[in-house]
Image (cartoon, rainbow, N blue to C red):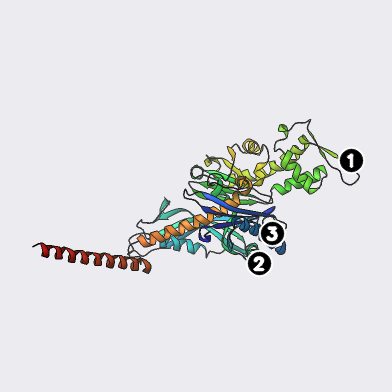
Amino acid sequence: MENDNLIVGLDIGTTKICAIIGRKNEFGKLEVMGMGKAVSDGVDRGIVTNIEKTVHAIQKAVEDCANMAEVDIGDVIVGIAGQHIQSKIMHGSIMRAPTEEEITVEDVRRLSSDMHNIVVPPGNSIIHVMPQDYTVDYEGGIKDPVGMAGTRLEADFHIITAQTTAIHNINKCVRKANLESKQLILEPLASSLSVLSDEEKEAGVCLVDIGGGTTDIAIFYENIIRHTAVIPLGGNIITSDIKEGCMLMQNQAETLKTRFGKAIAEEANPNEIVSIPGLRNRPPKEISIRNLAAIIQARMDEIIEIVQNEIMQSGYYKKLAGGIVLTGGGSQLQCISQLFEYMTGLDTRIGYPNEHLGKSVIEDVKSPMYATSVGLVLAGFKALDDREEKYRRRVANAGAPIPKIMVKREAIATNFFKSITERLKTIISDDIGEEY
């Protein structure tokens, strides 16, 4: 099996570390060749807190993934999240020589590269620079300025920064696991590739990825990402609430949440009781499903209020025709979409990474829990497609140097056809001479 056509996504989360390897089929769909996962004990709210435990979990997940796909894995696309993630809008501009006729791809790339040199708060590093709208000679609202005439090129950029030490710790864990990080991607951006459609991004949509330690938010409008945020609350805080409220062990609280939990207390049957085995020489403990739902709803109300506040601060609340799309492990909680609709007033659906998936022997990968992992693989293929597009533009651009291998192939073809033509002329002249 050729490794060149395979891409591996590595999701380093709070509850699990997941590795997925996939390739594109003839229809452009993603075929998952292997998947591996391990319990994440060394990560808390997206930040690595124990190097050795994280390295061991990465090695186990990647090894299981490689064995299933029967390939060797060396390069991975890594996701990053955590409450240290920050975003802001910055303005940049460049001046072009008046003699230059039109704006080129190199001009746009130079403008984006300049934004990587802006001053950020100490201890932070830029991980993404994403253009919003361009302005050419004070004419705004331009989506793609390439080919236009103008001397002053400006743009607003969505800048996403992360804590430098958090980036270094993630890269260190990947290197110690004998892997190489080819790209570092913000996890909500990866999730958006797997669960959002182009129509939703055009109409306006808010992606809410509820993970174990954090809840990630990404708002899209007119196919452009407009706002990102990370809330340091997720599914683990709900489990802790159940543990303290019902006086249970951590694993018992997690099982209760996933099997019997509801996000709306009124939807739970008040007469339904669950019996939990007691500790040593103690009788079983009975838990009311209605009380369990009340504990869950109290914390979910808080999370949804923070999400709604982020949407309001972004200024796009009234522009989200696509509403809200929930994904991540926390989105599998019963009645959660109804609670989001009730509290925010926006249409809500659960996002499954099915649209971009082809045939796969692994059914688990279609769960919202693996939306980020699938999105990381799709992000790797998207980067390949972008590089190919830039290469084609450069070759098609007037005056661009043609690669030597192309010149050589053209010379070989010219000489071949030239020799064939000379031989045909000789044969024809001989035939004519004999006839006449």
- Residue 121 visible in rendering: no
Residue at position x 59%, y 39% in the image: 349
**Amino acid type for the residue under numbered disc 1:** Pro
Q: CA distance from mark 3 to mark 1?
A: 37 Å
Question: Which callout, 3 or 1, points at the residue further toward the start of the chain?
Answer: 3
**Residue 434 lies in what quarter of the image?**
bottom left
Q: Quadrant of the C terminus?
A: bottom left
Q: Which residue is mark 1?
A: 283
Element type at mark 2: helix
Please report whichever mark, 2 or 3, sits nearer to the chain's N-terminal start: 3
Label 1: few (<14), some (14–19) or many (≥20) C-alpha neighbours in 10 Å: few
Going by the numbered disc 2, the residue's amino acid type is: Lys
- Per the image, the residue denoted by label 2 is 176
Q: Secondary structure at mark 3?
A: helix
Please tell me whether residue 40 is drawn above or below residue 354 in the rendered image: below
**Which circle's residue, 1 or 2, is located before the other in the chain?**
2
The residues bearing labels 1 and 2 have C-alpha atoms spaced at a distance of 47 Å
Please give the count of numbered marks on the rendered protein. Answer: 3
Q: Position of residue 426 (x, y in %)?
A: 18, 66
Identity of the amino acid at label 3? Ala
Q: Quadrant of residue 404?
A: bottom left
Residue 131 shown left or right of residue 294 in the figure: left
Between the C-alphas of marks 2 and 3, the distance is 12 Å
Nearer the observer, 116 or 88: 116
Q: Residues within 10 Å of mark 2 (few under 14, many from 20)?
A: some
In the picture of the structure, the residue carrying the numbered disc 3 is: 57
* Residue 178 appears in the figure: yes
Left or right of 282 in this view: 266: left
Say which residue appears at 18% left-offset and 64% top-offset: 427
